[in-house]
Image: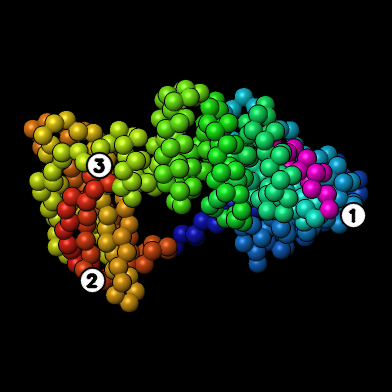
Amino acid sequence: MAESFSLADHIFNAQSIADLAHEYAAALPGFDPAAFQSTVLAGFEERGFLERLEWIADCLTPYLADDFPRMADQLEATMVPELDPTRTDDDFGRFIHAVPGVLAVRHGLAAHPDRALDLLYRATKRFSMEFYIRPFLNHWPEQTYARLQLWVRDDNYHVRRLVSEGTRPKLPWAKKVTLPPEKTLPLLTALHGDTTRYVTRSVANHLNDIAKTAPDLVVKTLSDWRDTDQQDPKELGWMTRHALRTLVKQGHGGALALLGYAPDAPVRLRSLQLKSATVAAGKAVEFDLTLTAEKRCPVIVDYQIVFQRHGGKTSAKVFKLKQTVVPADKPLLLSKRHVLKADATTFRLYPGAHEVIVQVNGKEMGRASFALTV
């Protein structure tokens, strides 16, 4: 049997720690790279992904000054050159360079916020400080927000992205922040015309987060941005689709209308047919559907699967099927094959009655049942 992939081992391993030790040795007098590597690697097996970053910081601390301002100077002296400023996307950096963020929170949050924010500003040009700006937003909201207002116009796009990504309300793996949308939307508005996809993707993801609690506000914001003409229409179109992806699945009328899809489009589901009334776990539920329309209609076709859950409850998950056009007076045939993974680690299958529900422009059009066996 093949060994399972370990992201922690892929990121934090003998080679990456050797690289880090080499960087530290060049800037920290008295630093012992061999001892550092040995100590760090010995503690990895029992620690998970983010815990390994904390452990690296533990092992580095004895080589650093006790007072934070001097420690920050030392950490800045160890920093590698800034990430390539000529790139515009997919230049996240290396996780090993997140250590200054860990130490900024540990030693600078309580008594040295200004110096710590300076450190985060420089560090995020090597690796995103999106996790580590968040404690400062919660502990020093006005002081940190004032920095974000400056950074939103920074020449370095990694700094600009930090403004959006670091304030996301639902950033994966990260601590919650208490900034309401009324505080973050002015920052996103300033960023939405950015020329780098790395920034505009973050802005769109941030809006998608907000959409889960304030959907109408997000639709209005995107509509307002369209009127300002500060972003290339093609890029803003991409941002809009990405930002509204959750609302589209939910059938939000305003989101669909902004994308050009009418919730009340004159589209009919002529037929929905399952290939089999019984599907075994690990196999696929297959279905065909036919749509008709009185006039040419742009459509987003999604489907839900209503799953059996523990205790006889059910839950539905929405999946994308097709973004297309139903021509006038000509049937549109669509087919789908959806594998019901028996070995999924995040979603357990339960036997019993399941349903496929077809929705067009957010509106349910029809459903069909099948039995799942496991």
For the stretch drawn in magenta, the main secondary structure is helix
**Which residue is at 39% across, 43% downward?**
245
Furthest residue toward bottom: 311
Going by the numbered disc 3, the residue's amino acid type is Pro
Please tell me the numbered disc located at residue 352: 2
Q: Position of residue 274 (x, y in %)?
A: 14, 55
* In magenta stretch: residue 249: no
Is tag 2's residue or tag 3's residue first in the polypeptide sequence?
3
**Which residue is at 29% across, 75% downward?**
312
Q: CA distance from mark 2 to mark 1?
A: 62 Å
Going by the numbered disc 2, the residue's amino acid type is Gly
Q: Nearer the viewer, residue 124 or 47?
A: 124
How crowded pointer 2 is (Cα within 10 Å; few <14, some 14-19, many 20+) is rated as some
Question: Quick one: quadrant of the C terminus?
Answer: bottom left
Instruction: Indicate the secondary structure of the residue bearing disc 1.
Output: loop
Is tag 3's residue or tag 1's residue first in the polypeptide sequence?
1
